[in-house]
């Protein structure tokens, strides 16, 4: 991941937050991809679309973690739910 910017205290705090968020997002992603795959087993015609969707979400999570280098971002969003964080980051106005 890219280096964070800010004061040394902000960077230390934000690094902890971002690392924890990365673990949580990866676990969240694993659960949701598993759900998508289970649906695809029941409905094979959805398999290609599911794999594409899973790859897109995985790339978006990686982008979220890498593109936000301002420590204040991680500190200010530390209590947001994952889906809210992703929705805000990928909002059309961005």
Image (tube, grey):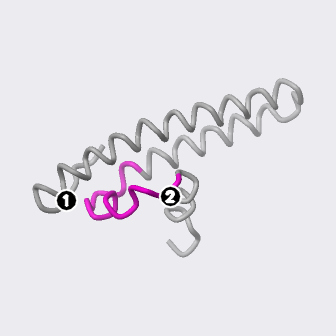
Where residue 47 appears, as percent x and y from the top left, is 79, 31
Q: Mark 1 points at which residue?
A: 5
Q: Is mark 1 on a helix, strand or loop?
A: loop
**Quarter of the figure with residue 46:** top right
Q: Would residue 37 be found to the left or right of residue 4 on screen?
A: right
Q: Would residue 5 be found to the left or right of residue 28 on screen?
A: left
> Relative to 68, does residue 15 appear above or below in the rendering?
above
The label nearer to you, 2 versus 1, is 2
Residue nearest the viewer, comparing 71 with 13? 13
Say which residue appears at 49% left-offset and 35% top-offset: 26
The magenta segment is: 65-81
Residue 58 is inside the magenta segment:
no
Q: Name the residue under label 2.
A: 85
> Relative to 79, does residue 48 appear above or below in the rendering?
above
Q: Is mark 2 on a helix, strand or loop?
A: helix
Local crowd size for mark 1, using a 10 Å CA cut-off: few (<14), some (14–19), many (≥20): some
Q: How far apart are marks 2 and 1 (CA)?
A: 20 Å
Local crowd size for mark 2, using a 10 Å CA cut-off: few (<14), some (14–19), many (≥20): some
Sequence order check, earlier mark of 2 and 1? 1
**Quarter of the figure with residue 83:** bottom right
Where residue 72 appears, as percent x and y from the top left, is 28, 64
Where residue 7 appears, as percent x and y from the top left, is 12, 61
**Quarter of the figure with residue 69:** bottom left
Where residue 51 appears, as percent x and y from the top left, is 69, 34
Say which residue appears at 65% left-offset and 33% top-offset: 33
Q: Would residue 24 be found to the left or right of residue 76 on screen?
A: right
């Amino acid at each position: 991941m890219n280096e964070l910017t800010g004061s040394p205290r902000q960077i230390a705090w934000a690094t902890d937050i971002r690392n924890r968020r990365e673990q949580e997002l990866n676990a969240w992603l694993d659960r949701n991809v598993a759900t998508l795959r289970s649906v695809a087993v029941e409905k094979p015609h959805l398999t290609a679309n599911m794999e594409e969707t899973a790859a897109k979400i995985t790339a978006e999570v990686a982008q979220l973690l890498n593109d936000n280098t301002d420590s204040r971002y991680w500190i200010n969003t530390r209590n947001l739910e994952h889906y809210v964080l992703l929705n805000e980051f990928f909002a059309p106005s961005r």
